[in-house]
Amino acid sequence: MKTMIYAHRGASKLAPENTMPAYQIASESGADGLEIDVQLTKDSIPVLIHDENVRRTTNGTGFVQDYTYDEIKQLDAGSWFSSKFSDCSIITLDYFLRWFKDLPLLLNVELKTNVIEYKRIERIVYDSLKHYQLLDRTVISSFNITSIKKMKIINPSVSTAFLTSTKRRHLPGYAHSHGASSLHIKYRMLDKKIVKQCHKNHMPLRIYTVNRPSWMEKCFKMGCDAIFTDVPHEAVEYRELYKKKQEK
Ligand code: G3P
Ligand code: MG
């Protein structure tokens, strides 16, 4: 089986994470999919940004939820990474999906609800994905199991994933019983037992964030369904090399 490659926050080693240049580069890397992080502004507009606070990845301060979209779009979301990207701004989910819909790629929308439980984010994101007819190639993930449950209530056939970096007994069973159709785990948690449990429960297993070649190879070898990586170009190259090695 082929392990899928998702560009984590875009090609985030080469361009500022969760911005258009990062996704444009990733879309040309040979990766199979893109991962985005979504939070809500004060006026309930879903925007692409990893942290609840804008400090790390923009020239602003304060929380995403305290900015209206008109205010947050004025921030410079690229200079922190390199002066080459000083014209980057925070984009809306709608803007991203309009660009994404014509690409032959998979999508992972991560709802950033583990710190702030944004009101109605599940419904808002679901409606956008439906509007752009993207539900059949999107997996919606969250570290917050309540978000997964809410998504399943909105539409039981939507593909969801429970995200975790914490070991627990019968993790696939736990995730499944809360409505998750797949599991996204931190690379350090990967072992034979979890792969076996996922296969037994018919749950796709995807691993984050896999940047080292040795870890990529481990994921390919263990039959993981996908990896999330900041270096999609490299992952595509290593997957090709791995395949050639197997064919010998
Ligand atoms: O979805 C995989 C990964 O993005 C989860 O962690 O913190 O990079 O959003 P984080
Ligand atoms: Mg993420």
Image: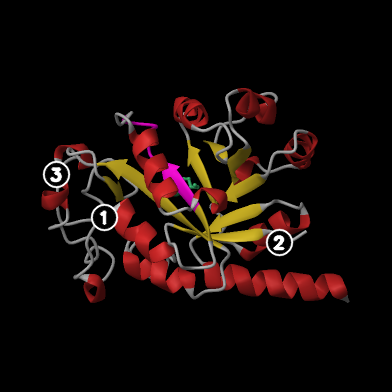
Q: Magenta segment, which residues?
A: 108-116
Dot 2, how many residues are within 10 Å of its Cα: few (below 14), some (14-19), or many (20+)? Answer: some
Q: Dot 3: what SS? A: loop
Whole-percent x, y for residue 51 in the image: 31, 44
* Residue found at x 52% / y 30%: 152
Q: Secondary structure at mark 1?
A: loop
Q: Residue at x 71, y 61 (%)?
A: 217
Cα separation, mark 2 vs mark 1, equals: 31 Å
* Mark sitting on residue 68: 3
| Circle 1: residue type | Thr
Give the Cα distance between marks 3 and 1. Answer: 17 Å
Any part of residue 88 in sight: yes
Residue 213 colored in magenta in the image: no
Residue under numbered circle 1:
57
Residue 18 seen: no
For disc 3, does the CB lie below 8 Å from ligand 2?
no
* Vertical side of 20 occupied by 161: above or below: above
The residue at the point 75 percent across, 70 percent down is 242
Expressed as whole percent of the image width and height from the top left, the position of residue 213 reads 63, 65
